[in-house]
Amino acid sequence: MIADDFAALKLFITGPTHIRPEIREAASLPEFGHRDKENDKRSGPIFDGLARLAQLPEGYRTFLINGSGSTCMEASIRSLVADDETLLNVTVGAFGDLYYNIALANGKKAVKLAFEPGRAVNPEKLAAAIDEHGASVVTLTHNETSTGVENDIVTLCKVVRDKGAMPLVDGVSIFGGADLRLAEARPAIYCTATQKSLALPAGFGIGFVSPEAAEKAATVSNKGHSTDILKQLDKAALGQALTTPNTALLNQMAVQLDYIVNTEGVQERFARHAKMREMAHSFVEGLDGFDLFAQEGFRSPTLTTVRCPRHVTADRLKSVLKERMRELGYLFDPGYGKLNGRLEQEGRAVMFRIGHMGDITPEMLSEYFEVLGEQLATL
Ligand SMILES: *Cc1c(COP(=O)(O)O)cnc(C)c1O
């Protein structure tokens, strides 16, 4: 059997993430018609659960778009940036760059404001860049998965609003692991996905849309079909997806959101993530020659980035450490490839990542640290 060769590794990467046995089993619940009333039994708990987990402000609406996080980001660009507007893409790493590249690929007038790897967005520089370029839309990354930086979206969205511009936020790797503070930040749209802190397989982008974003989308032309957030919202009002969804994933999603809201508890889930961040920081502080890569005060609750001693190369992380960890049953994350390439080229120390998001538990994490600590000592 072909599947006999599939390894059961414990995933400590930054997505996709560990899936609980109950959620794996939920994938074998019965298939159903996505336009049939059976769909409602899933969509009720899903949309309700998403709103509670996001602590969604009054008036915001949710859609599920087939694809993944970047599909939702693309829909936000296609639906909320007019051809004659200037879009400012603020980036602190690879996923900020992705938003910029999506904008360019869709023919939008985009300019980029970049910060050094490991640093958060500086609000004064953001304000100056909006003025300089006359930007009317700004994209922000809430949690930069390549560098482990969590930006303060409440402060940054306020800067964008004070300049009369509209903030679009990529929150792909943090939704489900922390309080997003959307009621204070009030982004026009917040894009996320299923396969990171929500601990489900990939398959949907998730969009949280403010009333003013829906109004603006009505004035933007050439939104495409599946990237039109108004078409998405129309179907979402029926609890449905615009195009045929993965019904196995909907089954899993309904079971997972019911569990998060009614069994684990939303606040308890956030507290578990905060605890795992503390654990990761203590682990790194206890390692000889390694230190935390991300700027203090802006360190992600869902992943931790670790700067290595100078003698450790990116290749050693990837070819040696990752393979040794695999033999021990774990999928280790040797850092974002392009970033480590850049760091090496600049003669700087490389880094690796520890994913501690979704349904990873403190017990699983401390077991991982025991094994990883032993292996790091031999590098
Ligand atoms: C993973 C990720 C994305 C890309 O999402 P996909 O679901 O792979 O399309 C975008 N932004 C951030 C911050 C991410 O972590």
Image (tube, grey):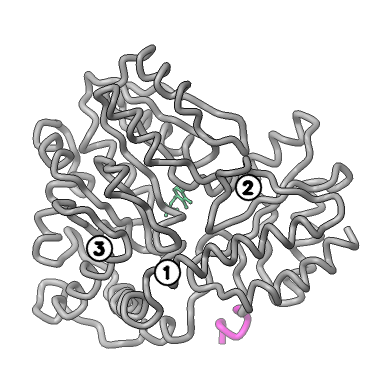
Instruction: Indicate the secondary structure of the residue bearing disc 3.
Output: helix
What residue is shown with label 2? Answer: 336
Name the image quarter holding residue 295.
top right
Alpha carbons under labels 3 and 2: distance apart: 31 Å
Q: Which residues are magenta?
A: 1-6
Name the image quarter holding residue 134.
top left
Residue 321 is situated, as x and y percent measured from the top left of the image, at: 79, 61
Asked if residue 124 lies left or right of residue 276, the reply is left
Magenta: predominant secondary structure element?
helix
Instruction: Indicate the secondary structure of the residue bearing disc 1.
Output: loop
Q: Residue at x 14, y 34 (%)?
A: 216
Hey, what amino acid is under mark 3? Ala
Hey, what amino acid is under mark 1? Pro
Asked if residue 3 lies in the magenta stretch, the reply is yes
Asked if residue 97 lies left or right of residue 247, the reply is right
Residue 235 is situated, as x and y percent measured from the top left of the image, at: 12, 59
Relative to 236, does residue 104 appear above or below in the rendering?
A: above
Alpha carbons under labels 3 and 1: distance apart: 20 Å
Disc 3 residue lies near ligand 1 with CB under 8 A:
no
Relative to 97, does residue 127 appear above or below in the rendering?
A: above
Q: Crowding near pointer 1: few (<14 within 10 Å), some, many (20+)?
A: many
What residue is shown with label 3? Answer: 51
What residue is shown with label 1? Answer: 201
